[in-house]
Amino acid sequence: MSALGGFVRAGAARRRVQSLVVGLATLLAVTSSVLGGALLVASDAPFDHAFARQHGAHLTAQFAAGRVTEARLRETARADGVTAASGPFAVVSVTPSLGGRTVPPLSVVGRADPDGPVDALTLTEGRWVRAPGEIVVAAGADGPPVRLGLRLEFPDLPGGPTLRVVGTARSVGRSADAWVVPAQVARLTGTGRAADEQMLYRFADAGTAAGVARGRTAVTSGLPAGALAGARSWLSVKETATRDTALFVPFLVAFGVLGLFMSVLVVGSVVVGAVGTGLRRIGVLKALGCTPGQVVRAYAAQALLPAAVATVVGLVAGRLLAVPLLAETAEVYGSAGLGVTVGTDVMVAGGMLGVVALTAAACAWRAGRLRSVDALSVGRAPTAGRGRRAAALTARLPLPRSVGLGLARPFARPARTAAMAAAVVFGTAAVTFGVGLSASLGEVVAAKNHNAADVTVGVQGPAARGPGAPTVTAATASAVTKAVAAQPGTRRQYGTALTEATVAGTTGGVPVLAYAGDASWGGFRMVAGRWLRAGGEAVAATPFLTAAGAEVGDTVTLTVRGTAVRVRIVGEVLDTSEGGMRVLTDMSTLEAADPDLTVSGWAVELKPGTDPDAYATALDREVRPLGLGATSAKYVNGSDMARVMDSMTALLTLMLVCVAGLGVLGGVVLDTHERIRELGVHKALGMTPRQTVVLVLASVVPAGLAGAAVGVPLGMSVHGVVARAMGRGAGLRLPESVLSVHGAPLLALLALAGTAVAVLGALLPAGWAARVRTATALRTE
C-alpha cells in the first residue's frame, strides 16, 4: 500500500482545487450539523436536568394580601399531590430609580436563605443578603444593569429607601426579579398597603398542563375567594426558556441538509472527474498489480483527506459559533454554561466522513471495474460525435463564434454539465432561502411593533411604565381626543386602554388591550379571520388561543374585576407582546365590567402631505398641560434573536454560494484541462485571449440558467417549510404577508444570481485558459 499511499498523496496535491471544493463543502455541512445538534440538545433536556437539580417550583403562586393567613398557606403544603413546598415569602412589586432614571418594576421577594426544598437559588456573583439595605438581583432579569455595589433608589416609597446590590442569583423557575431579607419587605411597601405572599410548590404529577392544573386546584381548595392573585406554571417557564433556541433548529437543519446534499454532489463530481482524467494512471496501477478494491480505496482516500481536515475545522467552527447562541439559554441552566457535547461531535464527524467515503467509493467504482487495456487505450477526448449537433445549431445563430462554441460545449459533457448545474441549484436555493428568511424576519419584527401611526400621544419616557405611571382621567382622555380631532392634518385616530383579566384554563392574568375607535389600520397582521368591528368581538394571537383551547369563531369568557365578559374570537393576529397572551377588543366590550377604564394612549394617522414632526410639536403644546406628550418617533422594538439569525443566515448562505461557485470551478477546471488542445487550435487560428475568456464563460451559462430555474423554486419551497416550522417553534402561526416575501423583482434578481454564481466559478479557469501559450496548449496530451 505504500505505492498507493504515494498515489493518494500525489492525487490530492495535484488536484488542489477539487480538494478545496470537497473540504469547503464538508466544512459547511459539519458546521451546520454541529450548530443544529447543539441547539437541539439545548432546547430540550438541559432545562429538565437543571430544573430537577435546583428543585424548581412546578407552580409559583402569589396570594393577595389580607385574604389568607400565613398559617393557612403553610397548610397548603400538605395538599394532595404536593411533594414539597417553600414559603410563604412576602412579595412586593416596586419601581426603582437609578441615578434619577426610572427603570422597569421589579418583583421583590423577602427570603432569608437561598436554599430550600423548592427553588434552590444559584448565586452567580457576590453573596446572599444578610441585613436590611441589601438586595440580590436575578441574573439576566429585565431591569437595571446589574453590578455589585449598584444602589437602587425608591423615592416614591416612604422614607425613600436605598438598596445596595450585594449579589446576583438565578432561579430556574424565575420566581422573582430580586430578593431581600424578610424585614426589608415592610419598608418597600407603600403606606396603607400590605405585601402579597408567595408560595412555591412541587407536585407528584406535573409533566402536563393538566397535572399542574390539578395541583393548583388542590392547593387553592378551601381558600377564600380571590385569595389567589396569580400563578405561573413551570411549563410556561420552560417554553419561554427554550423558545429562542428552538427557533434556530429548523433553519440550521435546512442549511445542514443543503450542505449535505452539496457535499455528496461535489465529492461525487470530483471523484468522477478524477477517474475520467486519470484513466491512463488507473491503467498503469492495474498493470502493476493493483486490485479493483485497492483502486477504489485510493480514489476514496483522495476525497477523504480534505474531508477529514475540513471535519476537524468544522467541529471547531461549530463550537465557536454555538457559544453566543447557547449563552442566552445558559441563563436558565445554572452557573455553568452549555456547550456542544462530545456525542454530538462524534455523530457529526462519523456521519460526515461516512457520507464522503460512501459517495467517493460509489463514484470510483467505475475505475475499479475498468480493464487495464481499456484504461491504457482510452484518451481524454469526449466520445466522437457527442455535442456536434449542438455545435452545428449554435453556428447558425447570430452570435459571436466564441459564444456559440461555448454554448455548445456543455452538450459534449452532459454529465459534468449536470453536476455543475446541480451545484448552481443548491447555491441558488440557498440564496433564495436566505433572502426570504431575512425578509420574513423583518416582517415579523414589523408586525411585532405594529407602529403604523404617524404620531402617538401618551405618557412619554420611562414614567409610562410600571405602577407609578401617571393616571389619565376620563376628563383628560376626552380633552386629548378633542385636541387631536381639532388639530389640522388629522386623518383618523384611535385610543387604547389596558386592563387585566383572567380566562378559564390559563394561569395568571391576561392583558386586555381595548380600543376606542377603528384600529384596523394600526399595523396588526391578520393570520385568520378579520379585525374586530363591534363590541363583544375580540382578536388574539396563537399562544392565547392555544392556552384557552379556542379558535376563530369560538366564544371565550374573560373575568374583569370579578365580572364575566363573553367575547367572540373573530380573528387570529400575529402579536408577540406579552408572550402572545394579549386579548384585543373594543372599549364598549368592557363598559359594564370596568366602567372606570380610560383611554391612556392615542395613535394618529395624518393626511397626506402633513409634516409629522411639525404636527407632533403643535399637538405636544396642547397636551403637555394635561401631563401627556406627543411624538412622531416610531416605536421600534428590535429583536436580538432576529439579528443573530440574520447574521448566521448571511454567513451560511455565503458559505453555500462559495461552495457552489467552487463546484462550478472544479468542473470547468477539468473541462478546460481536457480540451486544452482544442483551445490551442482555436488560438492558432486567431482566437484572442478575450474571446477565450468569453468561450469558457459561455460554456457555464446553460448550467447557470438551468440551475436557477430549479434552484429558485426549490429555495422558495424550503423557505416556506422552514418559516412555518420556526413559527411553530415560537408558538405562532404566520400570516401570508410573512411567508410570501419573494416578489417578482426579487425573483428576477435571484434567477440572475444562478448565472452569476456559475460565471464567477468559471472566472479563474477562464483566465488560465486565456493566458496559456498556443504552443504549450498544442503540446499537451
Image (spheres, helix red, strand yellow):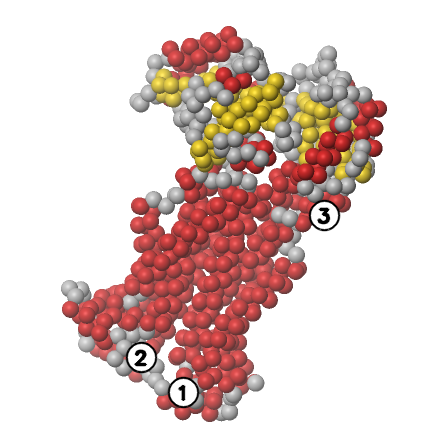
Q: Determine which of the numbered discs, if any, sits on residue 382 in the image.
A: 2
**Amino acid beneath label 2:** Pro
User: Is residue 568 shown left or right of residue 193?
Assistant: left
Cα separation between marks 2 and 1: 14 Å
Where in the figure is residue 712, as x and y percent of width and height?
37, 54
User: Is residue 171 shown left or right of residue 674?
Assistant: right
Can residue 90 be seen here? no
Q: Determine which of the numbered discs, if any, sits on residue 550 in the image.
A: none
Cα separation between marks 1 and 3: 61 Å
Helix, strand or loop at disc 3?
Answer: helix
Cα separation between marks 2 and 3: 62 Å
User: In the depicted view, which residue is nearer to us: 278 or 687?
Assistant: 278
Q: Which residue is drawn at the image coordinates 55% and 23% (left, top)?
A: 566
Vertical placement of residue 117 versus 714, above or below: above
- The answer to the question of whether label 1 and label 3 lie on touching residues, with beta carbons closer than 8 A, is no
Vertical placement of residue 431 versus 8, above or below: above
Helix, strand or loop at disc 2?
Answer: loop
Q: Determine which of the numbered discs, if any, sits on residue 49 in the image.
A: 3
Vertical placement of residue 138 versus 694, above or below: above
Helix, strand or loop at disc 1?
Answer: helix
Task: Identify the residue position indicated by label 1 in the image.
Answer: 375
**Amino acid beneath label 3:** His
> Image quarter for residue 679?
bottom left
